[in-house]
Amino acid sequence: MNLLLKLCGATIASVLIVSCSSNSPAASPGTTSRTTEAPTTEAPTATAPTTTAPATTTPPVTVDASKSSTTAIQVAGIAGATALSVGMVHACALLSGGTVSCWGDNSFGQLGGDHRGVGASVLVPGVSGATAIAAGQGHSCALLKGGSVACWGNNIYGQLGDGTNNDSTVPVKVIGVKDATGISVGGLRSCALLASRAVTCWGGGGPDLPSQLPRAIPEFSGATALAVGGAFTKMGNVDFACAVLSDNSVTCTLQTGISAEATALDVSSSLVTDVCAVLRGGRISCYSRDSHSAIAGVFDIAGASAVGVGGSHACALLNDGSIKCWGDNTYGQLGDDTRNSSDTPLPVSGLSGATAVDLGLQHSCALLQDGTVSCWGDNADGQLGF
């Protein structure tokens, strides 16, 4: 069953915000407070997707310190970046000339090209004139000048939108999308925000999906932003998306527990359905369907302007260009130079001048004012870019 819930005024994580703004003053400085509110990337078999998350347990994790970093490290080969999107274990940067460069896992060709996953970034072949990017679990997409969309990587659920279920290591045009103004992708599906403020999606999940071709999502009519989450694993699939509507409310395809005016929002790309929203006044509200979530609660973070959600951690971008993170820190994904998990937001060590933040499963990345990108956390698949 596909549950729809309107969340008054929220915006969304890995999100592309097209026209959401707030005139409310920032929260007054103070101590951060919190109140509690009630994966692999291996190719799955082609079973029907479900929107019900399976019960999971977290076994003890042994971390190879040589394959992670507790502090931010600059991604090799990235200069002149204007946008950033982080997938589950890969990431992509939009460069000033309209090209796209990606790094990390390439199990499905999501970096573009048939090379193995790499630490150093590589240019996606055949992409030019890009104006926005979106990285998911096993695929990536680029919004191109003129409003068309091209995608590459995993296509088992039709998430490339080319009318097939064939993976592609080179970008293929999404059929029928010509006037997109924004894009967002998750594990099983991809979505585009159109100039008419309608939303069209393709791929697996939901009552009208899977679909190899784009289909309109009527509940998202009037959207100003969207965020797509979810993941596929051998244990099961989760697929969900949220849209910010013109009245600043938010509609999601899975029930969430956030009900407040917000200015930005993000959703997780994992089997755990986590949603975080930046509320008016600088607070951040996070909801999870997992009762043992490491990030759920309401946090007073003065000057918060954006939020990112990972597999079990979250990060907030502040107006002064700093970033604070909380949740699981097994791989150093909080960036505070420790591996101690925290239920209160902690500043990322040595990082300043950030203009965007986005999170993967167990790592985090920031776009900086000088056009470089820095990442921290798990690097088992080269997702830190070195």
Image (cartoon, rainbow, N blue to C red):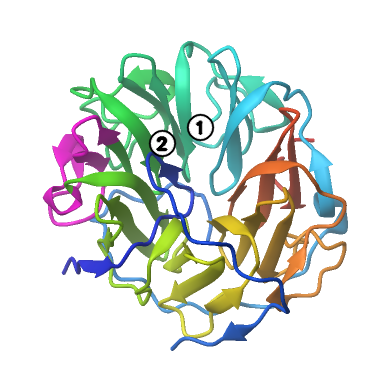
- Image quarter hosting the N terminus: bottom left
Residue 306 placement: quadrant: bottom right
Question: Which residue is painted at 74% across and 30% down in the image?
Answer: 372
Q: Are marks 2 and 1 in contact (CB under 8 Å)?
A: yes
Was residue 194 drawn as part of the magenta stretch in this picture? yes
Question: Which residue is painted at 42% across and 43% down in the image?
Answer: 17
Residues packed near mark 1 inside 10 Å, few (<14), some (14 to 19) or many (20 plus) = many
Magenta region: which residues? 193-220
State whether residue 306 is above or below residue 85: below
CA gap between label 2 and label 1 equals 7 Å
**Which element carries disc 1, helix, strand or loop?**
loop
Q: Which mark is residue 74?
A: none
Q: Left or right of 32: which side holds 260?
A: left
x and y, in percent, of residue 8 in the image: 30, 67
- The amino acid type of the residue labelled 1 equals Gln
Q: Left or right of 346: which side holds 244?
A: left
State whether residue 5 is above or below residue 194: below
x and y, in percent, of residue 110 in the image: 50, 32
Q: Which mark is residue 154?
A: 2
Q: Left or right of 247: which side holds 12?
A: right
x and y, in percent, of residue 322 in the image: 74, 53
Q: Earlier in the sequence, mark 2 or mark 1?
A: 1
- Image quarter hosting the C terminus: top right
Q: Which mark is residue 110?
A: 1
x and y, in percent, of residue 112 in the image: 52, 23
